[in-house]
Image (cartoon, rainbow, N blue to C red):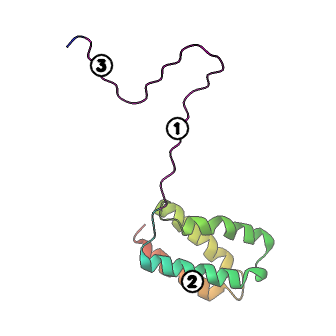
């Protein structure tokens, strides 16, 4: 068995040179997990409704919505994080006349689809 080599993981051999800064791994990130069909449709409807009434929302609230929507639409985000984003959207919608009831109903539907907290 003498002389057998077993290598696990990265093996790097550097001979001479200078300014060696490490290993670069060029691996693409995994594709985001798709949402279940029913959740996807509900989220798409929520996005359409928010886009239709975007001008009726205060600028600082538009920024909050812009930050919350990618979280809501991502199947990779933890459910707790998605729930918080949905509640932020519902809170903003509740203060905007045209958005209030329809958005809150959609958010409640999506929260139900996410399952118990």
Q: Name above or below for residue 3 compared with residue 46.
A: above
Q: Quadrant of the C terminus?
A: bottom left
Residue at x 27%, y 12% (from the top left corner): 3
Mostly what secondary structure, the magenta segment? loop
Q: Quadrant of the N terminus?
A: top left
- Which secondary structure, mark 1? loop
Which quadrant of the view contains residue 73?
bottom right
Mark 1 neighbour density, 10 Å: few (under 14) some (14–19) many (20 or more) = few
Residue at x 30%, y 23% (from the top left corner): 6
What's the CA distance linking mark 3 and mark 1? 24 Å
Q: Position of residue 32 (x, y in %)?
A: 49, 61
Residue at x 40%, y 72% (from the top left corner): 115
Q: Position of residue 72 (x, y in %)?
A: 55, 68
- Which secondary structure, mark 3? loop
Residue 4 drawn in magenta: yes
Q: Is residue 53 left or right of residue 48?
A: right
Q: Position of residue 20 (x, y in %)?
A: 61, 22
Mark 3 neighbour density, 10 Å: few (under 14) some (14–19) many (20 or more) = few
Q: Is tag 3's residue or tag 1's residue first in the polypeptide sequence?
A: 3
- The residue that label 2 is drawn on is 45
Q: Is residue 26 left or right of residue 115?
A: right
- The residue that label 1 is drawn on is 25
Q: Position of residue 91 (x, y in %)?
A: 64, 75
Nearest the eye: 53 or 15:
15
What's the CA distance linking mark 1 and mark 2? 39 Å
- Which residue is the extreme one toward the left? 1
Question: Which contiguous range is marked in magenta?
Answer: 3-32
């Amino acid at each position: 068995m003498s002389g057998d080599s077993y290598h696990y993981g990265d093996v790097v051999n550097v001979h001479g040179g200078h300014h060696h800064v490490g290993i670069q791994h060029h691996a693409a990130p995994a594709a985001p997990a798709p949402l279940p069909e029913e959740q996807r449709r509900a989220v798409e409807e929520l996005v359409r409704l928010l886009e239709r009434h975007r001008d009726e929302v205060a600028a600082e609230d538009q920024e909050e919505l812009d930050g919350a929507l990618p979280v809501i639409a991502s199947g990779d985000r933890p459910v707790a994080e998605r729930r918080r984003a949905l509640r932020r959207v519902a809170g903003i919608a509740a203060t905007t006349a045209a958005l209030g009831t329809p958005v809150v109903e959609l958010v409640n539907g999506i929260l139900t689809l996410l399952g118990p907290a």
